[in-house]
Amino acid sequence: MSEITKIDEFDRYVEKNHFNYTEMELAKRSKAIKDMEKDYPSVPGLWIEWLYDIIENKPKEEVEKIINDKLWLPVVNKDRMVGGDLKCGEIVNE
């Protein structure tokens, strides 16, 4: 007969806490993320987590400035050609 050996126990997975949240803050974060996932089902969960972490860890004034000045909108290229002569192009014969 073979000898039965004790198998070493594995540690359970512990979620990383990059922002050093307390246990109460982690519970609040988890609840807020679950609520946002219900309210916005088409937004990926990871994006919701990023949003929560950014809003919680940035100063309130900076978040308000981003919202009020609409800094999330893309920058429009104002140097693009609008009308006139075509400066470059390729003619493709079919």
Image (spheres, helix red, strand yellow):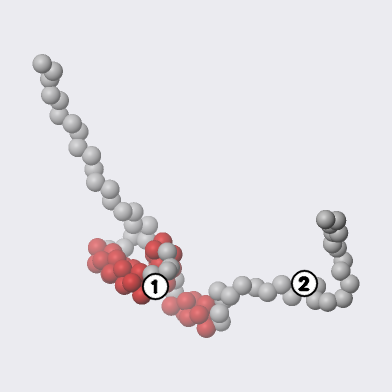
**Whole-percent x and y of residue 31?**
28, 69
Label total for image: 2
For label 2, the residue is 80
Could you say whether the residue bearing mark 2 is in a helix, strand or loop? loop
Looking at the rendered structure, the kind of residue marked 1 is Tyr
- The foreground one among 81 and 79 is 81
| Residue 32 in view, yes or no | no
The quadrant in which the N terminus is found is top left
Residue 11 picture location, percent across and down = 23, 43
Q: Which residue type carries mark 2?
A: Arg
CA gap, disc 2 and disc 1: 36 Å
In the rendered view, does 55 fall on the left or right side of 89? left
Residue 69 spot, x, y in % from top left: 56, 82
Q: Of the numbered discs in the image, which one, if any, rests on residue 40? A: 1
Q: Position of residue 17 (x, y in %)?
A: 34, 57
Q: Residues within 10 Å of mark 2 (few under 14, many from 20)?
A: few
Mark 1 secondary-structure assignment: loop
Q: Pointer 2 and pointer 1: residues touching (CB < 8 Å)?
A: no
Residue visible at 35% across and 69% down in the picture:
37
For the residue pair 78 and 42, the one nearer the viewer reads as: 42
| Front residue of 57 and 72 | 72
- Residue lying furthest right in this view? 85
Q: Quarter of the image containing the C terminus?
A: bottom right
Identify the residue at image location x=61%, y=72%: 74
Task: Kindly tell me whether residue 45 is visible in this rendering.
Answer: yes
Left or right of 73: which side holds 49? left
Residue that lies at the very extreme toward the bottom in this rendered image: 68
> Residue 93 versus residue 26: which sits nearer the camera?
93
Q: Residue at x 85, y 56 (%)?
A: 93
